[in-house]
Amino acid sequence: MSKSELTRTVGWIVGLLISYVGCFGILASPLHSFSPISRLGLICALICSVGAGVFFWAKILASVGKKRGWSLRNCQTAGLVVIIPGTVLYLAGRPFMSTTNVLLQQALWTGLLCTKFVYPNFASLGPFEREAPVTIFPK
């Protein structure tokens, strides 16, 4: 692993840790009767921290997926790795149903984004045709 790859990977891990601290700090904050504008700001902050977590998880998993030659299905299910540290943080604090919903959404979007990073032309293929069919007369 070269120095630039190592620096990039460490940057992704630091970004991931910061996004987790932000996400679960927001989810663990006590419930108050905020004004509607404050609630909107809180929701936007949560979406931004979850989005950063999705991006950094997908980048880390995509680098592993490219090196190991993962298939489309493996890239999509790799997003379930997100649930492991999320469950530890979920059990460390008091359980919230909103935390579970955020973790499931993050796992889904991480798998889709990892697939997009490993297979850039994934969306151009049809929903049921992932590989070229075998023909009698090849081009």
Image: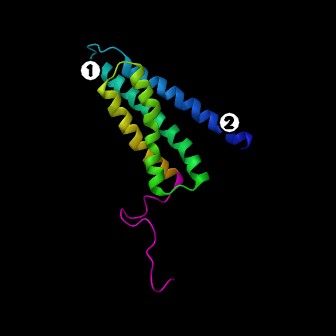
User: Helix, strand or loop at disc 1?
Assistant: helix
Tell me what residue is drawn at x 30 percent, y 21 percent.
39
Tell me what residue is drawn at x 44 percent, y 46 percent.
111
Residue sitting at the far right: 3
Q: Which percent across, then down, holds residue 130?
A: 43, 65
61 falls in the magenta region = no
Q: Mark 2 sits on what residue?
A: 7
Q: Is residue 13 above or below residue 127?
A: above
Q: Mark 1 sits on what residue?
A: 36
Mark number displayed over residue 122: none
Quadrant in the picture for residue 60 = top right
Label 2 – label 1 distance at C-alpha? 41 Å
For disc 1, the neighbor class at 10 Å (few under 14, some 14 to 19, many from 20) is few
Predominant secondary structure in magenta?
A: loop
Quadrant in the picture for residue 127 = bottom left
Q: Is residue 49 visible?
A: no
Residue nearest the observer in this picture, 27 or 95:
95
Q: Is residue 95 visible?
A: yes
Q: Is residue 113 above or below residue 30?
A: below
Instruction: Please name the amino acid that badge 2 sits on.
Output: Thr
Tell me what residue is drawn at x 43 percent, y 30 percent.
86
Q: Quadrant of the N terminus?
A: top right
